[in-house]
Image (spheres, rainbow, N blue to C red):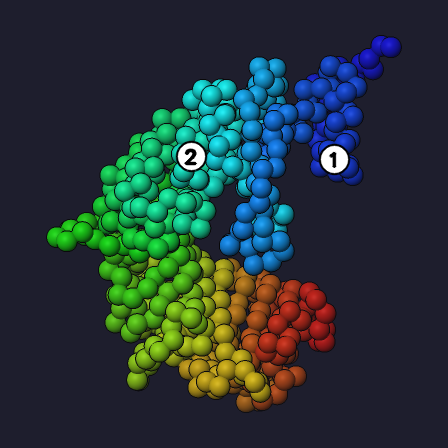
Amino acid sequence: MALYPALANVDIVERIVWHLDVLAPGRYSTLLRFALVCVRFRDPALSALWRECSVLQLLRLFSTTKVVGVREDPTRDYGSTTLPVYALTEDPSSSECSRFRLYAAYVQKLYNRPGPWIDGWDIDPATWGFMEHAFGNVSLFPNLKDLRWFVDLSAPYAIVNFLSPSIRRLYFNCTTRYDPVDTEEERQRTLAEILGSIRANTPGVADIQMKLGAVYISAALLSPLYHLRALRRFKFTVYDSKVDYDALQGLTALDLEFLSIKVEVNPSPGTILRPLTFRRLLRLEIRTLYGDHPVFDNFVSPTLRELDIWRAQYINEHILRRSCAAWAQNFPSLRSLTIKFRQEDNRGAVMPNPQPTLSDTIAPLLDISSIQIIKVELWHLVPFTVGDEDIVRISHAWPKLTTLDLFVWAFNFPGGDPHASRILAAFSLTTAALSALASGCPHLHTLRLPHVRSGLRAATEEQDASVGDHRLCYLFLPDAEPVDQVAFDRFVGATFPHLAQYDCRGWQGLFAGRLGGMGGGSGVAA
């Protein structure tokens, strides 16, 4: 039977396969049947079938892959806590090795452990010995782009078979919860071999996420990564150990654009804390900021646009001001600052008395006129006061502001935070703050201010104080205390006539909208 002319077009066939892969029910069986239709359909269908797979799926191509036992998984606190253990029990045949290579050529994303919500499995380390004997110490995946690997330090050579010059994204996790090696020397030696293999076999990798545990990270250990000239994104997490300051210094040789670190830095005795200068860094995530950390004040980048501090510990106002001054000096192109003071990290913190104002605390940052996004999250503490004057200074300093989010986690209702009233008392905001932002920040898109009081004294003030065409879309005023709710809503509607979502009813109405809201609400007209 003659082939329909349109199906001779490779682009059309690949488009059909895309629909079968993404939209059709029964993806696997549908693509399998499509691959069996004819030779023209085979390669596009097999490419979709094998584009993303697990190591276990590939090992099942061998007839000698069997379940050899089970083991406990201490990391899972839900579902089954036992994992079936698979293993190659004999050397695969030459025909099976050829079939493995055939399908491995289609693989672009590979992982050796399932996701956290999927029933798990494990691979017996003896399997890698059979693999090495059958294939040698060479890469088996010529088109692999993305590799996710939980490293078993008892079989470090296993990852070498799966590294490839084509890899652009690499995630590997090597922590105490997964590996059986006990001594520091063995960990150091094995990790050095793995990192050396990554340098030698993945010269084009652009994105690395690395989790390490129970091993001291020195500059010598991390040095193979300093030679990966294509690396642009690096996410580095170290558990139960420390990192030498010089190890971070070595990263400055790379043209990183994104850096995320969760480490405890331990400078060697006599180490000079030279600035950590990154030439092209655009985003910096410091995922923990505990105690008095002059180390993290040493990051410098003239190009940085986003600074995100996930968990900060508040010590005192002097350290916070010092950090703000350092960020203002070291990141002159900063556009976005997010800092989260988490509850569990600030137990026992002593608030200054009297408290400084927000604008005084962040005063050096007010000189950076390019800032567009400010997000501050405060869990059960407020280390500064926030009044109308602070918001006025912010509106004058940051005219390009698009997001101002001051989030306070303090439940002001029965059974909530017993200190909520004291915490919210640090905020003395009125409608004057809203008016200042409306006039000074014309690009403001999202605004959250806690505990705003009305500030309206007469109907004439209500009407005269808020006339404009501001484009604010989202307004959240949790724990607001307007004297006259109707007048307050009318003021908000006149000041920000284009709101898509507006809430001022506290936590119970956080996702409700008063003015033509998303998610319901009273629907008060602007």
Q: Mark 2 or mark 1, which is nearer to you? A: 2
Q: Dot 1 corresponds to which residue?
A: 27
Q: Secondary structure at mark 1?
A: helix
Q: Which mark is residue 202?
A: none
Q: Secondary structure at mark 2?
A: loop
User: How crowded is the residue under tag 2: few (<14 C-alpha within 10 Å), some, or many (20+)?
Assistant: some
Q: Position of residue 521 (x, y in %)?
A: 71, 73
Please report the residue visible at 77 percent of the width from the left and 37 percent of the height from the top. Answer: 26
Instruction: Using the image as rendered, state which of residue 361 and residue 40 is in the foreground.
Output: 40
Nearer-N-terminus badge (2/1):
1
Instruction: Using the image as rendered, state which of residue 169 and residue 89 is in the foreground.
Output: 89
Disc 2 to disc 1, C-alpha distance: 35 Å
| In the rendered image, the vertical position of residue 434 relative to residue 518, given as above or below | below
Amino acid type of disc 2? Ala
Amino acid type of disc 1? Arg
Q: Dot 2 corresponds to which residue?
A: 155
Q: Position of residue 81 (x, y in %)?
A: 58, 54
